[in-house]
Amino acid sequence: MILGRVTQTTLFRELTTSVTRLQRQIAQAQAQVSSQKKLQSASDDPAGAAAANRLHGEVRALAAAQDGIGFGNAVLSAQDSALQQVDSLLTRASEIAAQTTSGLVTPEQRQQAAAEVAQIESSVLSLANTAVGGRYVFGGLATGQQPFANLDDPGFDPATAYSGPTDPFVLPIGSGQTVTLTTPGDQVFGGAISALDDMRQTLASGAAPTASIDAIDAAAAGIREERAAIGGRMTRLQDRGDQIDSLTAGARTLVSGIEDVDLASAISQFVQLQTALQAALAVGNKLQTSVLDFLQL
Amino acid sequence: MSIFAPLSIARQALLAQQRALQVTGQNIANVNTPGYSRQTAVLTSIPPEGDAVGGGVRAGAVLQAIDPFLEARRLASASTLAAATTSRDLLDRIQGTFPVQGAGIGTALQEFFAAANALATSPQDIGVRSDLLQKAETLASQLRASAASLASSQRDVDRQVVQTTRDANQLLASIASLNTNIRAAEIGGATANDLRDARREALLSLAKSLDVHVVEQPDGNTNVYAASGVALVLGSDAATLTTVNGPSGAALDGGTVAQVAVRQGDAVVPLPGALGGALGALVDIRDQTTPAVGADLDTLATTLRDAVNAVQTDPAGRDLDGSVGAAFFAGTGAADLTVALSDPRGIAAARTANPGDNTGAQALLALGDTTLAALGDVTLGDFFGALQAQTGALARTADEQATIEQTVSNTLAAQRDSVSGVSLEEEFTNLIQFQRGFQAASQLIVVSNHMLDDLLAVIR
């Protein structure tokens, strides 16, 4: 701006403009320092605001998925622990089968053994009804009616003992990924329960449970397979959990880069503006000098 | 030549210096008067009458230091500055509808889908179901609050249109009456400097309200036309601006908006075209920006309603009681979006007869990541993010524009000061100069008096 004549009004207007501008900048800098957020409104960084909105969404979605993974881990641990006990019970049943097949065992002894097998079968059924927070871990994680019938229920039949859902429970773990959390109970326990039931009835009749040795072993192998599958799912959840932690940390870093103030630079900016304001006001003070001071009228 | 000639010259000189001192005094007195233009008394020597030496000095016209082209630019700048600052303030309010910090639609949307994830984990949990309903209620109320805020902001802008139009009428009347006064004052050939300053100020104020074209007439009148060419002031006659109700339902709240019109006799004719100035910005934001943001908000609300309801009312969907789900959201837009479902058992989280199934909840959760055709193939969250960023970008651009216009206006003001402003230094030196002139002329009278005394002494 090149001016021919400069008047007092010009000088004072320049001063007012500068001071107003500096005070506005100081107010913004102060808001940034006190809130530690540089994104005060979308106009501060429109593209950044959109990115921050999306990143906040990701963080929330990942946190929700992480909650689900925590629950999934609890379910898988309960499944694994129950199946481990079933495995030992089947080992015991296998021993009984081997002992009672011998021709030296009397029918009475076999009937006594049948009582122990009934105990085992009852325990397996009870383990198959394991629940976490009221949700049956081998019954599609449904609540309410237990998925497996009890041995002493009237008309108990291994073929119809399972009344739970026939579909697996699929857990969402974020970003559209899923993990199958449960195998329907009849697929897990069907072999074991029918083998134990056969063995119990054979023993109760006083006969040698010859066929049960293989049947029990096959059922135990099925249980171990399921345990291996559960181990695989646990690893998958563990990996996904770690991944979510690192994704969340990454998203938080990005959000922070968009939203958060670099305090050191914000404070130095604030101080710089204050110095400029003081300088402007000091100059304004000197503007009081006028020709009047030097003229003797 | 007469011996009285020096006396006559001295008398003329005293009058002329006095006149110049009077003008200097007027300048000093008005050093802080807005719109005052510096005046100068034009001193001219009186030409000789049959003599080699002239007849002294005469104070002629009092001239104003004015640059008419600069004044025209100031008028245009006042309009654009008023439009820019008005836009900035209004757009800042609109972007405030979507805060980036704290609770808002974006957060509510994200928490709704986080609750859907919890439902997919625990589909039979009444607590989780209630939480989802609660989050849906929060989301709906955020949308309603934003829609209500937009509508009330639009209603405020409409009131401002009416008020600004009324204010402009007073200025039009004042300009017409100044026209009359200036014409009367200048009939004798004088210039009504101070009245002209007042008229320029009135025109500047008027230009802040709406863009005007000003045509100065040879007779001293200034005719004022709106940007569309409609005459607002012709000589002593001022048009009356008024507002008429626009089409019903044009406003977000369902009411009418005011249209700026001019009264011509008994007829009221809407002002055609863009108005410019504050009125132009007000009308533009009321009729273009605000409805566009409102429409986007409605699109978000109806798409959310349709997408969630489609999952909820899927024929395969089952609520906790084994029935097909009823609609989740109800309403026709953002302003009246409500959660229709009141019983948490009614959420159709399952897609099989097994109440522990979470397939329906998974479909609800997947909505959060689904691009929807109704939104232009983006997700609900991204659509809101884009809306928020768009209002932010508008506010930012308006702020930058206002800063630029302010700088232009400051520069023009400084240039006007440079031409028309009163410099006290200048006036005080003038004061001394004319005082000295007055003293010298007085001295001339003393000398002439002595000469007469000497001459009379000879006779005595």
Image (cartoon, coloured by chain):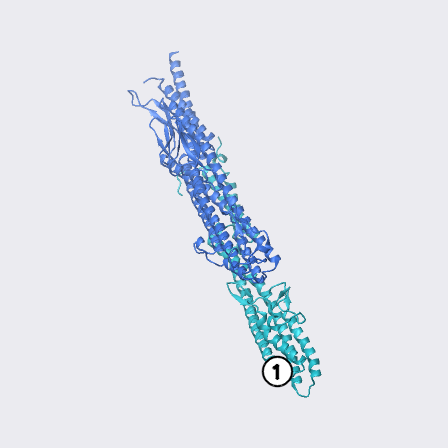
Instruction: Determine the chain carrying the residue at label 1.
Output: A
Q: Position of residue B157 (x, y in %)?
A: 48, 39
Colour used to depict chain B in the structure image = blue
Tag 1: amino acid: Ile
Locate residue B72 relative to residue B153 in the image: left or right: left
Locate residue B177 relative to residue A56 in the image: left or right: left
The residue identified by callout 1 is: A213
Q: Position of residue B357 (x, y in %)?
A: 56, 63
Colour used to depict chain A in the structure image = cyan
Tag count in the figure? 1
Q: Nearer the viewer, residue A187 or B412?
A: A187
Specify whether residue B36 is in view. no
Outermost residue on the top side: it is B460
Locate residue A29 relative to residue A118 in the image: left or right: left
Q: Nearer the viewer, residue A159 or B301?
A: A159
What secondary structure is found at the residue carrying circle 1? helix
Residue A68: name its quadrant. bottom right
Please determine whether, in this image, residue B236 is positioned above or below residue A7: above
Outermost residue on the left side: it is B50
Q: Residues within 10 Å of mark 1 (few under 14, many from 20)?
A: some
Q: Position of residue A95 (x, y in %)?
A: 65, 82
Please determine whether, in this image, residue B46 is positioned above or below residue B205: above
Quadrant assignment for the C terminus of chain B: top left
Q: Nearer the viewer, residue B382 or B213?
A: B382
Q: Position of residue B21 (x, y in %)?
A: 43, 27
What residue is rendered at 38% in x and 12% in y?
A: B459
Quadrant assignment for the N terminus of chain B: top left
Specify whether residue B130 is in view. yes
